[in-house]
Structures are given as structure tokens and as C-alpha cells.
Amino acid sequence: MAVFNLTPSEASAFILTGIPGLEAAHLWISIPFAMFYIIGLLGNFTILFVVGKEQTLHKPMYLLLCILAFTEISTTTSVLPKALCIFWFNLKGITVSGCLTQMFFLYAGLMVHSSILVTMAFDRYVAICNPLRYTTILTNSRIAKIGLASLIRPVLFVLPLPLLLSRLPFCANHIIPHMYCDHMSLVKMSCGDITVSRMYGFVAAFVIVGLDLILIALSYALIIRAVLRISSKEAHQKALNTCTAHLCVMLISYPPFFFSTLTYRFGQDIAPHFHILLANVGFVIPPVLNPIIYGVKTKDLREKVGKYTCRR
């Protein structure tokens, strides 16, 4: 992991409390978190393995699904192992550099996730609106370039978050009332001028993710327009079914993100434990459900997974 250069501070570590108000139930809370983590790893590694082994799945949609699976593995691994150490062994300490690094990988992973969802929406648009040109528009090399761009974008837009925080002095109280290092918790602990860091975090979250949602909405508006021009109801159903998996993934990804971001800034009356539990839904549940959604809704992938899992 990268290490960020920090200004001198009175303490060299932060304390992650886990879930404030529910410390007595940490052991019980850890059980579903551990189960979700293991199931998510198994599901996403299965997708990576099956798509990697099967040449017939080396197509844009499945390559995008692989990038999504890799992103979800990275994002959950940046948070949940440390959270489980807090729940099981009461190991609450984390270095300042480790905290900023965790924050970078968490938000970078969420941004890559959003970028891939945008690309998947474009993939569905091309498949429905320009099916004859699909193989020429979305080639594997072009998908590789999109994947690279999706990795570069977080470096450009997320890296300033820990760099801005690393230049701020932190107060004597280094207790983070959370199970991982998030931007707003660190901002609130700073004794310096947090205006730039606070505004950058807010603007980056809503401008970048908001732009992604606008592009997704535009893709689906064009898809709906194309579908409405089809006279056959059966063709309507078939075209829309190809988008079902992607729509389900978006519905379990974006709402928790926006709720968590808005709650930190405007939801002071919301109980901390409720906010923290819901904040974790955005990166704990999707890695579990996404492989299931795409496995059920995508016939080719379902058959290939069955080929390996049912083999004696």
C-alpha cells in the first residue's frame, strides 16, 4: 500500500471504535459481515475464474463484469478484514498513514465501480440500439482502454482527499466513531482549516457520481426510445430483459452511497449506529448480490458456472 507524507502530529495512530453504541453486540454483528465477505469473495472469484477459463466469454460484457468483480474484491478487502479485527480481537488502532491509505482505496474502488456501471449502460445501449455494429464498437481492446481509464480517474480525483488531509493537524482526540476510515470522520477531527477538504469531498462525490448517473440515464433514455419503436411485444420484453441485471446492480449500489454522504453532512439527528450500518450496505451487499444477479440473468455465464460447479 502507498504511504502518504504526513505533517507532524501529536499521535501517530487513530482509534476505530467499530459501531458506536453497539460495542456489546460486535461479536454478533461480525457474523453476517464475515459471511457476506466470504460469499462475496467466492462469488466474484468464481466469475473471474470462469470468464478467464472460457474463451467464449471473452466478450465486452463479461470483461466488464470481471473488472466489476475485481473492484468489489478490492473494495471490501480494504475495509472488512480490519473491521473484523475490531469485532473479534478489539484491535482498534490504525496508523495515520494506514488510515489515509485505506480511505483512498475505499473511495477509489467505489469510483471505479461507478465507472464500470456507466460503461455497462453504454454496452447495453449499443447492444440494443446498434446490434449490428456491436462487435466493431465495443472491441476487447476498447474495453481494456475503458478499464484503464476507470483506474486512472480515481487516482486523479480521489488522491487529493488523503493528500489534503495529510497537510492538516489533527486534534488530541484521535477516535474515529466508525469501523473504517472515512473522509468526513477525519475532517471533523482536524484542528485546522477544513474548508477546502470538506468542499472538495462534497463536490467530488456529487459531481463525479452525478455525472455518471446522468450518462446512465441518457443511455437508458435512448434504449427506451429504441425499444418503443419496436412493434413486437416479445421483442420489447427481450430487449428490456438484457438490462434487468444492470438496473438491479445500480439500485443496490447508488442509494446507500448518496444516503451516507448526505447523512454525514445534514443528518445530525440520525443515530450513529444506524448510519454506520447503512453506510456499509453500499460496499458489503453488492459484492454478494452482483455475482448472483448476473449469474441468474445471464444464460451463458450461468451455464459456464454450472459446468465447473457441478463437475464431479
Image: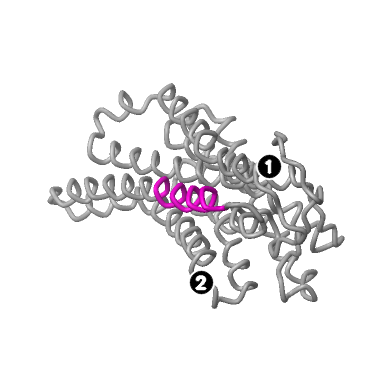
135 versus 197 height, above or below = above
In the rendered image, the vertical position of residue 23 relative to residue 229, given as above or below: below
Q: Is 152 above or below relative to 101?
A: above
Residue at 31% x, 26% y: name it.
137
Q: Work out whether residue 76 or residue 169 is closer to the camera in this orientation and state it.
A: 169
Q: Residue at x 55, y 76 (%)?
A: 270
The amino acid at mark 1 is Thr
Residue drawn at point x = 45 percent, y = 61 percent? 255
- Location of the C terminus by quadrant is top right
Residue labelled with disc 1? 101
Q: What's the colour scheme?
A: one colour
Magenta part of the chain: 194-209
State the CA–CA distance, disc 2 to disc 1.
27 Å
Give the mark, 2 or 1, whose residue is nearer the N terminus: 1
Secondary element at image label 1: helix
Q: Amino acid at mark 2?
A: Gly
Q: Position of residue 75 (x, y in %)?
A: 62, 46
Toward the viewer: 100 or 257? Answer: 100
The answer to whether residue 165 is visible is yes
Residue at image location 79% in from the left, 63% down from the top: 87
Q: In the displayed orientation, state which residue is furthest to the right.
A: 89
Residue 204 in magenta stretch: yes
Residue 267's label in the rendered image is 2
Q: Is residue 1 visible?
A: no
- Percent across and percent down for residue 247 are 39, 54
In this rendering, the count of numbered labels is 2
Q: Secondary structure at mark 2?
A: loop
Most prominent secondary structure in the magenta stretch? helix
Q: Is residue 261 left or right of residue 79?
A: left
Quadrant of residue 276 within the rendered picture:
bottom right
Classify mark 2: residues with Cα within 10 Å, few (<14), some (14-19) or many (20+): some
